[in-house]
């Protein structure tokens, strides 16, 4: 009786953990899509969860059945289940089932991946808004070549119009992700990847770097503001009339590893550099990654302790930085 209670308690605990793990599911952004691309991803997630759930139910049921049937009992202390080696039917079944599961999950996954590379269905006849998204440590730079606008750490887009993000990096590899609107895609220096999105609801959406490449990445976030076409045109006009000009010297300073707020300019850095070009000029500052508390963060007044530690370290090592 005690063994039976222990078994039932174990099964109940496993099922409880599984059920409770989904309590916050409704609050996850990916389960509340605001665009057709995100809806495709949600459909794929739901399809996968259904099959993962079925597999778990079957595995748990078989586990309970086998443990119960072959449990130790006084009347079968010497009982040994028959060996299944050489049973071709059983071997075919346990080989075929995983293969079928892989196919069931693989086909919609591949189909969805190809769909995400194209303009969403229903928007093919519209001219996409082109925005160059450049990642740098630790900020996002958005360039509108047609509107001659550049923003940092925020991007405005019109609703119900396809947007083509041309993704690249000014330095390390990052990952561009707007959970409510699309999946993630990598940004790489001197390379360009493309990502189509459409926002079919007005609102403010969260975007970030989802690549783990240093402590600074967690604060590498941006806002996506989906506006009506009238509000978007109004914003464009205001920026073109009132925002300051960006110079190459200012741009080089902003590319240094640091955290910036929201900034707006009435021209773009594409005038003098396109980081997707294989021959593009490099704006790298490797020395800045070795003198601060951690790579990617620029300290101001609060760096006294860090500076003191650095000076003490230099004193003990004779000030020799070669190879360190």
Image (spheres, rainbow, N blue to C red):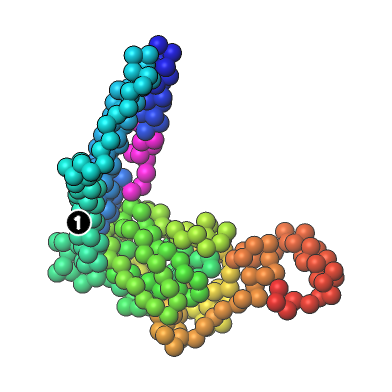
The residue depicted at 43 percent of the width and 13 percent of the height is 2
Image coordinates for residue 12, horizontal then vertical, percent: 37, 23
- Furthest-bottom residue in this view: 279
Residue drawn at 67 percent across, 70 percent down: 290
* Residue 270 visible, this angle: no
Q: Quadrant of residue 90?
A: top left
Would residue 41 be counted in the magenta stretch? Answer: no
- The quadrant in which the C terminus is found is bottom right
Residue 211 in the image: above or below residue 283? above
Q: Is residue 243 left or right of residue 236?
A: right
Name which residue lies at 46% across and 63% down.
153
Determine if the magenta segment contains residue 26.
yes
Q: Is residue 262 left or right of residue 60?
A: right
Q: Which residue is mark 1?
A: 107
**How far across and how far down the image is residue 148, in percent?**
37, 78
Locate the N terminus by quadrant. Answer: top left
Q: Nearer the viewer, residue 135 or 316?
A: 316
Residue 107 can be seen in this image: yes
- Where is residue 233? Give x, y as percent: 30, 67
Taking depth in this image into account, of 7 and 78 the one nearest to the observer is 78
- Residue at the far front: name it: 78
Q: Which is nearer the eye, 64 or 312?
A: 64
Please name the residue shown 47% across and 69% down the image. Answer: 173
Q: Residues within 10 Å of mark 1 (few under 14, many from 20)?
A: few
Percent position of residue 155, x then y = 39, 64
Rendered image quadrant of residue 141? bottom left
Say what secondary structure mark 1 lies in: helix
Q: Quadrant of residue 227?
A: bottom left
Q: Horizontally, is 321 left or right of 264 in the view?
A: right
Which range is magenta? Answer: 19-30
């Amino acid at each position: 009786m005690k063994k039976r209670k222990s078994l039932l308690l174990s099964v109940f605990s496993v099922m409880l953990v599984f059920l409770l793990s989904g309590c916050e599911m409704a609050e996850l952004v990916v389960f509340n899509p605001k665009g057709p691309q995100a809806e495709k991803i949600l459909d794929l997630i739901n399809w996968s969860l259904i099959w993962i759930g079925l597999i778990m139910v079957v595995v748990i049921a078989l586990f309970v059945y086998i443990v119960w049937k072959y449990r130790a009992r006084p009347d079968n202390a010497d009982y040994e289940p028959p060996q299944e080696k050489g049973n071709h039917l059983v071997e075919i079944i346990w080989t075929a089932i995983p293969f079928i599961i892989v196919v069931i999950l693989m086909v919609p996954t591949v189909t969805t991946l190809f769909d995400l590379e194209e303009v969403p269905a229903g928007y093919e006849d519209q001219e996409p808004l082109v925005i160059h998204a450049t990642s740098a440590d630790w900020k996002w730079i958005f360039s509108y070549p047609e509107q001659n606008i550049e923003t940092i750490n925020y991007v405005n887009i019109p609703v119900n119009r396809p947007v083509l993000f041309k993704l690249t990096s000014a330095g390390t590899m990052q990952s561009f992700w707007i959970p409510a609107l699309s999946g993630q895609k990598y940004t790489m220096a001197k390379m360009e990847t493309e990502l189509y999105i459409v926002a079919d609801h007005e609102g403010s959406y969260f975007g970030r770097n989802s690549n783990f490449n240093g402590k600074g990445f967690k604060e590498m976030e941006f806002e996506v503001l989906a506006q009506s076409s009238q509000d978007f045109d109004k914003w464009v006009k205001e920026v073109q009339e009132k925002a300051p000009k960006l110079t190459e010297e200012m741009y080089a300073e902003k590319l240094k590893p640091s955290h910036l707020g929201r900034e707006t300019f009435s021209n773009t850095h594409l005038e003098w550099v396109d980081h997707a070009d294989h021959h593009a000029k490099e704006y790298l500052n490797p020395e800045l990654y070795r003198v601060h508390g951690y790579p990617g963060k620029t300290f101001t007044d609060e760096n006294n302790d860090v500076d003191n530690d650095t000076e003490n370290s230099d004193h003990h090592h004779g000030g020799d930085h070669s190879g360190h």
